[in-house]
Amino acid sequence: MYGELTLGQPAIRSVLGQLDRLHPRLPRGTRLLAINDPLPHRYELLLLLRLYFRDGALEMDHETSNDGRHQYVIVWCGTTLYLLTDELSVH
């Protein structure tokens, strides 16, 4: 009855579509910093990324907890996802 709104399926589809477009490859146990997370609950993106990358050791923080020890930064600007490193931009 409320599945699409409750589960956030459009937002999840959007995240997966953006990741598919970028084809990123992350080392096992990568530590990400997420900025402008499009999903409503803080843990949802982490779980989705762990499934997508098949990496249960992947770690993720949100912009409020930046301690500078992140290998990658994942940023949403509107509906576009950017994956950045301190060396170069993956997109």
Image (cartoon, helix red, strand yellow):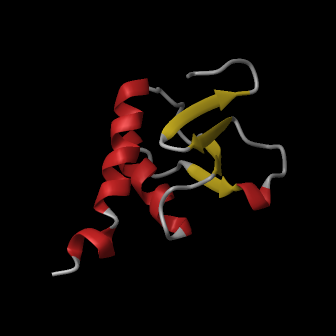
Pick the front one: 38 or 87? 38
Answer with left or right where residue 81 lies relative to residue 12.
right
Where's the C terminus, which quadrant? top right
Can residue 86 be seen? yes
* Relative vertical location of residue 28 with respect to residue 62 in this rendering, above or below: above
Q: Of all residues shown, which one is farthest toward the front? A: 78
Above-or-below relation of 9 to 40: above
Q: Residue at x 37, y 26 (%)?
A: 21
Judged left or right of residue 53, residue 74 is right
The image shows residue 25 at horizontal and vertical percentages of: 47, 26
Question: Image quadrant of residue 47?
Answer: bottom left
- Outermost right residue: 67
The residue drawn where x is 44% and y is 45% is 55
Q: How many marks?
A: 0
In this picture, residue 10 sits left or right of residue 22: left
Q: Quadrant of the N terminus?
A: bottom left
**Res 30 → quadrant:** top right
Q: Residue at x 61, y 41 (%)?
A: 75
Q: Position of residue 69 (x, y in %)?
A: 79, 43
Q: Position of residue 20 (x, y in %)?
A: 34, 31
> Percent x, y for residue 67?
84, 51
